[in-house]
Amino acid sequence: MRFIKNMEFCRMRLILKVLPVIFLFITPGQLNAQEDPPRPVQITVTAQILSFGAFYHGAVGGTVIIDPDDSRSATGDIVLLGMGYSFSSALYEILANPGTIISVLNGDDATLTGDNGGTLTLQIGDSDPLSPFVTTVPYGVITYLNVGGTLLVGNSGANPPGNYTGTFDITLVQE
C-alpha cells in the first residue's frame, strides 16, 4: 500500500514538472523579454524661436497670434506687415521612447521688454502635436514640437514701436 502511495506521489510530481514545459511548447505567439526601462525625455531648443514679425497698431491695440503651424493672425486694430521680418512658432526637438505620453504645460505669461521702454505680454499657445501626445518613433529619431503664442498689444502709447524680447517657460511631463 505504501509503495502505491509513493508511486502516485512521484507520478504527480513528474506531471507537475512536465506540464509547464508542455504549455510552453504549445503556447501560440512570441515570447518577449521585459522592455528596457524608460529613458527620460530629452528636449533641445532649436534656432527657430517664437517670433511675431512686423506689425502696426493703432489707438486700440489687440493681439498677434502665431499658431503652431507657423500661421499668423491679428485682432483689434493691428495690421500685419511683411517688411522682411520673419514670424514663426518655437520649434523643439524631442527624444523619447516610443509609446511615451508627453504633456506640454505652459508656464505663466511672459513679459517682453522693448528697446524703447515698452512692455508686451506673451501668452504661450497650443502645440503641434497637440498636448498630450504619444511618441511613435524609435528613441534616437527626433519628434518635432512646435509651440505658438499670443502677443497682447496695447495702444501705441503703451507699446511704442521697437524690438521686444523676453523668455518663456514650458514644461514637458513624461508619463
Image: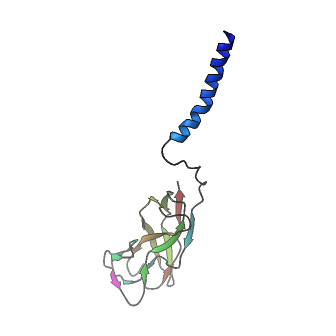
The one nearer the camera, 83 or 23, is 23
Which residue of the protein is positioned furthest toward the top in this rendering?
A: 1
Q: Going 64% across and 25% down the picture, which residue do you hit? A: 13
How many numbered circles does the render carry? 0
What is the quadrant of the N terminus in the image? top right
Above or below, 98 against 45 in this view is above
Left or right: 122, with 97 as reference point = left
Q: Going 53% across and 62% down the picture, which residue do you hit? A: 171
Left or right: 172, with 57 as reference point = right
Q: Position of residue 58 (x, y in %)?
A: 33, 82
Q: Note whether residue 168 is visible.
A: no
Highlighted magenta segment, given as a residue range: 75-83
Residue 81 is one of the magenta-drawn residues: yes
Task: Give the quarter of the image for residue 56.
Answer: bottom left
The one nearer the camera, 16 or 47, is 16
Q: Note whether residue 14 is visible.
A: yes
Q: Position of residue 145 (x, y in %)?
A: 47, 69
Residue 65 is one of the magenta-drawn residues: no
Q: Going 54% across and 57% down the picture, which residue do you hit? A: 174
Q: Position of residue 95 (x, y in %)?
A: 55, 66
Above or below, 27 against 60 in this view is above
